[in-house]
Image (cartoon, helix red, strand yellow):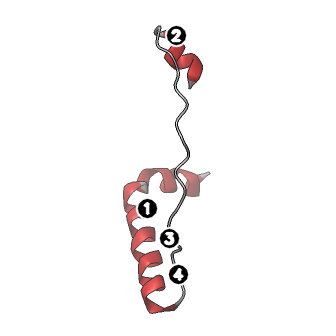
Amino acid sequence: MNSKVEKYGLQAVERPRIKATRKLDLSGPEGQQIVKSETKLALRTHRNTFRKLADM
């Protein structure tokens, strides 16, 4: 990334890492619902990519 930015005459800046402040508990019915909904979203968003990978 730095070389891409510097190619345009800009100076690269170091950004601080943002650490997670909470732990997410995926056990139980609420956790299962989170996993299911996020999986559906990923499958819907990247439908063509998964289709191409399946055809390989």
Name the residue rendered at 53%, 73% in the picture: 23
Which residue type carries mark 2? Lys
Helix, strand or loop status at disc 1: helix
> Residue at image x 47%, y 84%?
32
The residue that label 3 is drawn on is 22
Where residue 14 sits in the image (x, y, percent)?
A: 55, 31
Identify the mark nearer the N-term, 1 or 2.
Answer: 2
Name the one closer to the observer, 56 or 37: 37
In the image: residue 42, left or right of residue 23: left
Which residue is at a point 55% across and 56% down the rendered structure image?
19
Q: Residue placed at 51% from the left, 75% from the top? A: 24
Q: Which residue is mark 1?
A: 42
- Judged from the image, the secondary structure of the residue bearing numbered disc 2 is helix
Examine the rendered structure and indicate whether residue 5 appears above or below residue 46. Answer: above
Q: Are marks 3 and 4 in contact (CB under 8 Å)?
A: no
Closer-to-camera residue (18/43):
18
Mark-to-mark CA distance, 4 and 1: 20 Å
* Residue 41 drawn at (x, y percent): 38, 65
Mark 4 Cα-neighbour bin, 10 Å: few <14, some 14–19, many ≥20: few
Image quadrant of residue 27? bottom right
According to the picture, the residue beneath numbered tag 4 turns out to be: 25
Quadrant in which the N terminus is drawn: top right
Q: CA distance from mark 2 to mark 4?
A: 44 Å
Q: Amino acid at mark 1?
A: Ala
From the top left corner, tell me how far across and down residue 49 is, in percent.
48, 50
Say above or below: 56 vs 14. below
